[in-house]
Amino acid sequence: MLTDMKPIEYFKEMVATAVRHQRIRTCETTEFYLSSLLTDFTSSEKLGAEPLCITYLKALESDRSMQGRLLKDLGDIFHFRLFLRQPEEKDS
């Protein structure tokens, strides 16, 4: 169903629901980070086309500033892909 909800609002709601469902404690900053991360991936260019192992090798061969950025991107992509693989909650 299509709505007028902005992606950041949608993901904020999804993250809040997941946090409640998993019964974990988190802070508002963490939930905002996760919501923003998911929103960033609504643009396909963020996902990149190369395998994660290539990005990792590039990071290892880079200077410190580039290495930090590449490793952050690598972690973000990994977490996003992990999020997509989570099974949906089934109605009981």
Image (tube, rainbow, N blue to C red):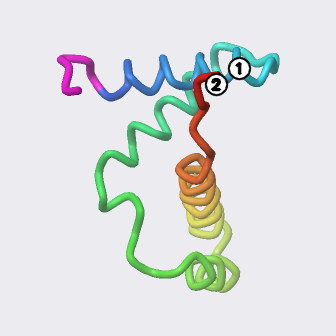
Q: Which mark is residue 21?
A: 1
Q: Is residue 44 above or below residue 87?
A: below
Relative to the observer, which residue lies in front, 61 or 11? 11
Residues rendered magenta in the picture:
1-6
| Residue type pointed to by label 1 | His
Q: Is residue 73 above or below residue 39?
A: below
Badge 2 crowding class, 10 Å Cα cut-off, few under 14, some 14 to 19, many 20 or more, is: few
Quadrant of the rendering where the C terminus is positioned: top right
Task: Identify the image quadrant of residue 68.
Answer: bottom right
Dominant SS in magenta: loop
Q: Is residue 4 magenta?
A: yes
Q: What residue sits 58% from the left and 76% below the top? A: 52
Quadrant of the rendering where the N terminus is positioned: top left
* Secondary structure category for the residue under label 1: helix
Marks 2/1 in contact by CB < 8 Å: the verdict is: yes
* Secondary structure category for the residue under label 2: helix
Q: Is residue 83 above or below residue 63?
A: above
CA distance for labels 2 and 1: 5 Å
Badge 1 crowding class, 10 Å Cα cut-off, few under 14, some 14 to 19, many 20 or more, is: few
Q: Which mark is residue 18?
A: 2
Q: Horizontal and vertical percent for residue 9?
A: 37, 18
Q: What residue sits 29% from the left and 51% below the top? A: 43
Q: Horizontal and vertical percent for residue 33?
A: 57, 30
Q: What residue sits 59% from the left and 18% below the top? A: 17
Left or right of residue 26, residue 82 in this image? left
Left or right of residue 24, residue 43 in this image? left
| Residue type pointed to by label 2 | Ala
Task: Identify the image quadrant of residue 18.
Answer: top right
Q: Which mark is residue 40?
A: none
Q: Horizontal and vertical percent for residue 55?
A: 56, 78
Q: Is residue 3 magenta?
A: yes
